[in-house]
């Protein structure tokens, strides 16, 4: 097997990527292409599903050619994807009936408000999720209600719904398979994470017909093969996982209490709770981490919507840096943020607030405030938001964290990682391979075809690159967290409902 490779398809929010991995988890070739972000109205975010497919298959070919290998050298394909983003397509033609509605899209926020009192508890008990426009269910309903003739056609069985994993598998197999895996299903508000199946009560609350749903499968199994003529050989498709769950697997957080935080556009912290779906009393999500051999492993998740994106805002919105990498030097040019706090609630706040109506704010400025203080406050805001996730997580799980494994583009910022360790009072550890999302998908696929034998083998491949030890006094940590929470209060509930929903 050692002369063979695994191909991971990593379909993210802003780009489609493909990575070829070898047996020891080294990267042999990468293809990446950005695609269009469509903003038809304030608060709406769409993708062209056809473009997602064309860029994804294009980068898969590019990764193979960069690695200098042929499709017949690939033992299996693993798929990982931006989660919750919703596509509905025509089963006869394979064409989407509308643009995909992206996870960040807020168009169903007021609908969520309208059913919150009656149904939020039931939805949370069964799905582990908070009722929010973030998840797929209300997006499916919106498409069925707003695309002409869609509900009627769905009733006749003519339409298929899928998250991006389903859409890719459908296209990779030439329209043969309409499936998803348990991690992606667990982000829809339609799937009972305890029984492991779509649920009639949930379907009826959100008015979604069963006829549009994909079959839910394990995260690691051979589902089928790529269609003839697509890549040059028919490759088994053998792993599917939502990107944050795949990163948890790729970080080898395989035991109860192990956690990772991914610092990309947003921040997503997941803690493995093994086979217990731990309910949150602190507004976190309970979600499926992976399902292997019919057995579900669960995680507690905290989702922050704006993390690395605040650095993009410093670059594109304020113009005070030219590239994301410059932020560290600018922030280091001052000793502290000098009391300035920036709350990047640009699209509301996710966990633990779930406030669609919060908006960004900067407080504590004086005549002495410079762009360096703002840059430092922006970086610190990423760490403060993550610290709040960890606070909630430790309350829910009842277990103190031993270390936090980190990855994602913004985790390369040493200044921020040290501040993160200081605020958490827990060591922050960065692995050698930070492409953990794609690696996790590769592991899921490789396990299914015997390329890797066991999760123990995977855990042994994880290697530490850098460790940040907490250095801050607990009293100072306490003081800073209290000030942060005061700043958050000033950002909350700012936009009025009519213009936000
Ligand atoms: N040195 C850095 N310090 C802070 N943020 C950074 C740095 N380098 C990149 N970023 C941020 O990381 C994000 C990109 O990370 P990535 O993991 O590729 O995100 P995604 O998968 O969500 O597109 C961008 O938002 C960028 O602003
Ligand atoms: O595409 P990413 O990496 O920003 O991840 C998006 C998440 O899956 C949304 O839940």
Image (cartoon, rainbow, N blue to C red):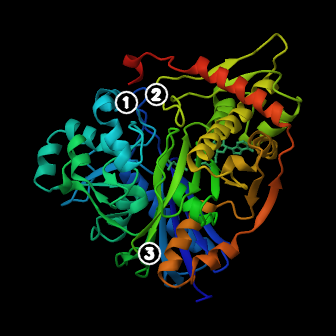
Cα gap from disc 1 to disc 2, whole angstroms: 7 Å
Residue marked by disc 3: 238
Q: Quadrant of the N terminus?
A: bottom right
Q: Where is residue 415 in the image (x, y as percent from the top left)?
A: 82, 42
Determine the secondary structure under disc 2: loop
Q: Where is residue 171 in the image (x, y as percent from the top left)?
A: 34, 65
Ligand 1 location (quadrant): top right
In the depicted structure, whether residue 408 falls above or below residue 359: below
- In three-dimensional space, the C-alpha distance between marks 2 and 3, rounded to whole angstroms, equals 37 Å
How packed mark 1 is, by other alpha carbons closer than 10 Å (few <14, some 14-19, many 20 or more), is: many
Q: Mark 2 points at which residue?
A: 356
Disc sitting over residue 109 in the figure: 1
Depth check: give the residue in front, 471 or 214.
471
| Left or right of 436, for residue 144 | left
Viewer-side label of 1, 3: 1
In primary-sequence order, the first of circles 1 and 3 is 1
In this rendering, the count of numbered labels is: 3
Q: In this view, does 74 lie to the left or right of 251?
A: left
Mark 2 or mark 3, which is nearer to you? Answer: 2
Query: Residue 452, how many percent across, how many down?
Result: 57, 82
**Dots 1 and 2: beta carbons under 8 Å?**
yes
């Amino acid at each position: 097997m050692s002369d063979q490779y695994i191909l991971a398809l990593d379909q993210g929010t802003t780009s489609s990527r493909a990575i070829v991995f070898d047996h020891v988890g080294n990267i042999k070739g990468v293809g990446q292409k950005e695609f269009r972000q469509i903003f038809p109205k304030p608060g709406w975010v769409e993708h062209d599903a056809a473009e997602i497919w064309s860029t994804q298959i294009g980068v898969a070919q590019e990764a193979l050619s960069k690695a200098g290998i042929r499709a017949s050298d690939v033992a299996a394909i693993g798929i990982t994807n931006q989660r919750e983003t919703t596509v509905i397509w025509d089963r006869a033609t394979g064409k989407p009936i509308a643009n995909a509605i992206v996870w960040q899209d807020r168009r169903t926020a007021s609908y969520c408000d309208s059913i919150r009192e009656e149904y939020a508890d039931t939805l949370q008990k069964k799905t582990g999720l908070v009722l929010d426009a973030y998840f797929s269910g209300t997006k499916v309903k919106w498409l069925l209600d707003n695309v002409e003739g869609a509900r009627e056609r769905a009733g006749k069985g003519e339409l298929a719904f899928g998250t991006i994993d389903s859409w890719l598998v459908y296209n990779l197999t030439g329209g043969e398979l309409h499936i998803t895996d348990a991690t992606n299903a667990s982000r829809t508000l339609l799937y009972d994470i305890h029984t492991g199946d779509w649920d009639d009560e949930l379907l009826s609350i959100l008015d979604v017909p069963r006829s549009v749903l994909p079959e839910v499968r394990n995260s690691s199994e051979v589902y089928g093969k790529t269609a003839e003529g697509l890549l040059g050989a028919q490759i088994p498709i053998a792993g599917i996982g939502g990107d944050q769950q795949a990163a948890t697997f790729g970080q080898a957080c395989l035991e109860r209490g192990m956690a990772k935080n991914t610092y990309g556009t947003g921040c997503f912290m997941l803690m493995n709770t093994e086979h217990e779906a731990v309910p949150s009393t602190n507004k976190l999500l309970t979600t499926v981490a992976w399902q292997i051999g019919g057995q579900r492993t669960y995680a507690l998740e905290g989702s922050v919507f704006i993390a690395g994106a605040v650095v993009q805002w410093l670059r594109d919105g304020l113009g005070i840096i030219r590239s994301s990498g410059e932020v560290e030097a600018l922030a280091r040019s001052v000793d502290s943020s000098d009391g300035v706090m920036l709350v990047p609630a640009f699209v509301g706040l996710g966990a633990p607030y779930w406030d669609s109506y919060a908006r960004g704010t900067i407080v504590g400025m004086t005549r002495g405030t410079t762009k360096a203080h703002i840059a430092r406050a922006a970086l610190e805001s990423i760490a403060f938001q993550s610290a709040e996730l960890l606070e909630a997580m430790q309350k829910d799980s009842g277990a103190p964290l031993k270390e936090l494994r980190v990855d994602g583009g913004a985790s390369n910022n040493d200044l921020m990682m040290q501040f993160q360790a200081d605020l958490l009072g827990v060591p922050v550890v960065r692995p050698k391979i930070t492409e953990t999302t794609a690696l996790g998908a590769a592991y899921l696929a490789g396990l299914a075809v015997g390329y890797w034998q066991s999760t123990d083998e995977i855990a042994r491949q994880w290697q530490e690159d850098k460790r940040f030890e907490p250095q801050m006094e607990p009293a100072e940590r306490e003081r800073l967290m209290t000030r942060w929470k005061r700043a958050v209060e000033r950002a909350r509930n700012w936009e009025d409902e009519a213009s936000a929903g």
